[in-house]
Image (cartoon, grey):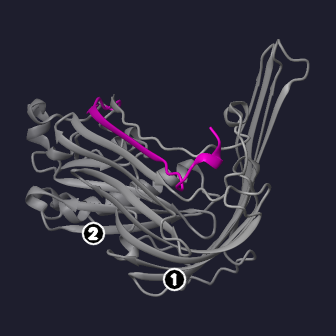
Amino acid sequence: MSPKTVGALPYRGFFILSIQLLIGFNHLLAQEIKGDTIPNTVLSAQVNAPFVYIDCQDCDHNFIRTELSFVHYVRDPEMADIHVFVTTQETAGGGREYQFSFIGRRAFAGTDYTLKHYVGQNATESENRNAIIGFLNMGYASFILQTPLGARFSIEYKRDGRDSVVPEINDPWNYWVFQAYVGSVQLEMESNQTKFNSRWGLYADRVTEDWKFRLRPYFNYGLVNIQAEDRDDPVVSIQRRHGFDSYAIKSLNDHWSAGLFGTYLTNNGQNLHHNIVISPGIEYSLFPYKVATRKAITFTYQLGYGYHDYYEETIYGKIKENLFDHQFKGVVNILQPWGNIETGFSGSQYLHDLSRFRVELYGQTSVRVFEGFSLGFQTEYSVVRDQLGLPKGEASLEDVLLNNANWPQIFFSEALLPLLTPLAQSIPIL
């Protein structure tokens, strides 16, 4: 098939739907109590102790139950009097911010609050675990003090003898955090073919209360060498996909932010020699940013200018061009006791020809139906009509299979996939 024969700009559609039946078997059964199997001895000793469900992926649950044994831990959130979400996000200094969200249910309905704790990048695992215990203990206290069990609690203040004013810390890096990564390095060798793929790059981030900066160069290199029996010379494909992402975002208030985004990309498989895009943008958050780790609904609009330099002349007779586009994004991330929602959409469009656009949708939802069971859905859908860089001339099947060239594509696919996942696995929303 030759790109020359395509009368209209091609588009590409993709759709996946999956239904998950989540059967929960918590691997931490010790000391967890199922509603109708609570021993009489426990009921008589701690009849007033609340039932707690901890929604935390990286917590040491055994350690928590051992150190804070004055409450009942359950594996079903519907049985809980207190639902605790523990989420984390990276801080400017390279450490992590823990956010403990306590949600009261049943007799404690209406008692909801959040505690925050900062862990330095040099903190040990033991220090992290002890800090989590301390903040869970403080969170439990406000609930337990509402019960007769509260008479057994006391509050203690530990004075360290130093001045109560915390001195300002001099940060020699001025809030910059650098992180190098190697995403993957793969090497496959067979008698008649060799494959090599690698991804690596660098993150440089600076985050303060008012500003967020990122500089991210990345590199992708792939090689395929195939020796066919009917050919003297091997078939060789070399893929290079390198780029640079950056942004500077200013927080305007609890709901609005504005920023400038810049990207650079070179990709021989997509006929992109140099692709430079600069886009100012603005974002609105329905909820305050301070609760974004547990619930976030955001809308972003960007207006961009792009310089496109191609390796080969395109099917539209261009070797380079300057284009303006705009894009709109919406993201929903909700983490609640009844389940979680993670979904979003994005749409982009070239302003010189509004028929050249791209739409992408994705979604993942998990709803707890009853004890031990949760129903989940996953969807993906995309329509692509902005393949402006398709090279002129014939693209052989060999080139397409080796990712040396792209064909215009028109396709739609659908899949229904049942999946099994433990109910105890929680998905943090960042």
Q: Which mark is residue 258?
A: 1
In the picture, measured across the screen, residue 24 lies left or right of residue 213, that is left
On the image, the x and y values in percent for residue 1 come to 62, 37
Please identify, in this view, whether the residue under mark 2 or under mark 1 is nearer the observer: 1
Q: Mark 2 points at which residue?
A: 113
Q: Residue at x 40, y 78 (%)?
A: 284
In the image, is residue 301 above or below residue 200? below
Q: Residue at x 25, y 47 (%)?
A: 53
Looking at the rendered structure, the secondary structure element under dot 2 is strand
Q: Residue at x 66, y 75 (%)?
A: 175
Mark 2, other Cα within 10 Å: few <14 / some 14–19 / many ≥20: few
Looking at the rendered structure, the secondary structure element under dot 1 is strand
Q: Which amino acid does label 2 sit on?
A: Tyr
Q: Which of marks 2 and 1 is nearer the N terminus?
A: 2
Mark 1, other Cα within 10 Å: few <14 / some 14–19 / many ≥20: some
Residue 421, quarter of the rendered image: top left
In the image, is residue 114 above or below residue 239? below
Query: Can residue 418 be seen in this snapshot?
Result: yes
In the picture, measured across the screen, residue 260 lies left or right of residue 139, that is right
Query: Can residue 217 be seen in this snapshot?
Result: no
Q: Residue at x 71, y 78 (%)?
A: 174
In the image, is residue 1 above or below residue 268? above
In magenta stretch: residue 18: yes
Q: Which span of residues is magenta-colored?
A: 1-28
Give the position of the C terminus as an image quadrant. Answer: bottom left
On the image, the x and y values in percent for residue 20 come to 29, 34
Separation of residues labelled 2 and 1 (CA atoms): 29 Å
On the image, the x and y values in percent for residue 215 come to 70, 68
Nearer the observer, 23 or 163? 23
Q: Which amino acid does label 1 sit on?
A: Ala
Nearer the observer, 161 or 61? 61
